Image: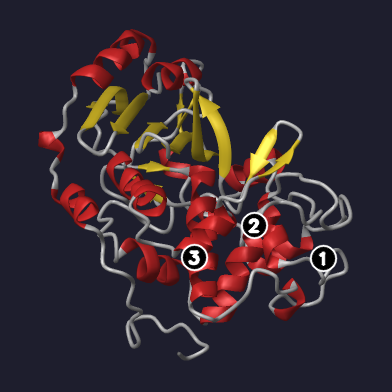
Amino acid sequence: MSSRFQVKTNRLHLPKMKPSLAFFLLLSTNSFCQDRVQELLNPFQDSLMNYGLVALVDDGAKKESGAVGWASEDNPISIDNRFCIGSVTKMYTATLVLKLQELGQMNIQDPISKYIEHHAFIDGEITVKQLLNHTSGLMDISDAKLANIALLEPDKDYNDAYLLSLITAIDFDRGTKYAYSNTNYFLLRKIIEKITDNPYRDVLTELIIDPLQLASTFPYHSNEIEGLAHPILGDQDLHEISKTATNRISVGIGNIVSDANDVNTFLRALFIDKTILNEESLSQMTNFQRHGKTKIGLGVFEESFGGKTVYGHTGRAISYIAYAHVDVESGTSYVLLCNNANDPYIDEAIENVCE
């Protein structure tokens, strides 16, 4: 196989989806059993004055979904609305890296100096794996201050050179501890683009969106996406000012837009039906290492929700919240999406839905 990933001109052939996944892809939202999840969300309805919350539970035999609140000022929210899924994006990015490893185009044990240009505050001996599991020691460039600047100056050119210039310190020696850093996934995005000679969005589309027929998943955030729930901060609608700067800053980190059904399809394809990655790659992804209270694999965490042990990731971006998790033991997947990152009810909703 060529060492260069090529979009369109040399399409990659992924394993065929198992019948159960193909079946779920054919289900329409009208066939969902909504009663139980909807009943669990209904108590929040009167508290959600200008934003909304959707939830989906899929145990492999049936899907249950519910929605309460608002997608925008005059539009009630529905299970079909689309949301920025924030750092849930990192699961997709990690999947792309492991897929490229399967295709023989890289190895997660490679030092990043093989792909990333010299930088005074980037240790070239950091491995791709250490980026994936946040043990690189790289400072986090994508903090709240940068997000605020991006919203205030949406037309600023937040290119890679600018983002690299924000790396001005090494927090700790590589491999010695864990610290969550968006910088890791900024560099992983650059590595993906270096290896494939294609933009991240094209690689994501070729390896995940198209094979899984994710019609409501977009590689980038844009307020021009139809059905996008408006991001809400307090009483402010950020829809008109949120599309440009945060889009460029968050590529590969936290900018994918999707709906609950598509996120669920991805989760089940990855962890339940196992049609995206091979057994070895999935084993690497879910080889969780404990760092204090955190158990992290490669782009995925092991957590406890509703008394269940689940695999997945959470996300907060602009003013969205996303929870995407799978109880592998029972084969049940859970997706909750909200268009207000300061929602005080989300944790209670998660506990209710995941009970």
Q: Earlier in the sequence, mark 3 or mark 2?
A: 3
Look at the image and tell me in which quarter the C terminus lies. top left
The amino acid pointed to by label 2 is Leu
Q: CA distance from mark 3 to mark 2?
A: 11 Å
Mark 2 → mark 1, Cα distance in angstroms: 15 Å
Where's residue 180, x and y in %? 70, 44
Q: Position of residue 52 (x, y in %)?
A: 35, 25
Point 66% across, 51% down: residue: 182
- Visible residue check, residue 238: no
Label for residue 122? 1
Mark 3 lies on residue: 96
Residue at 47%, 91% in the rendered image: 2
Q: Is residue 135 above or below residue 193?
A: above
Of residues 45 and 284, the one drawn nearer to the viewer in this rendering: 284
Badge count? 3
Residue 27 in the image: state x and y as whole percent: 14, 45
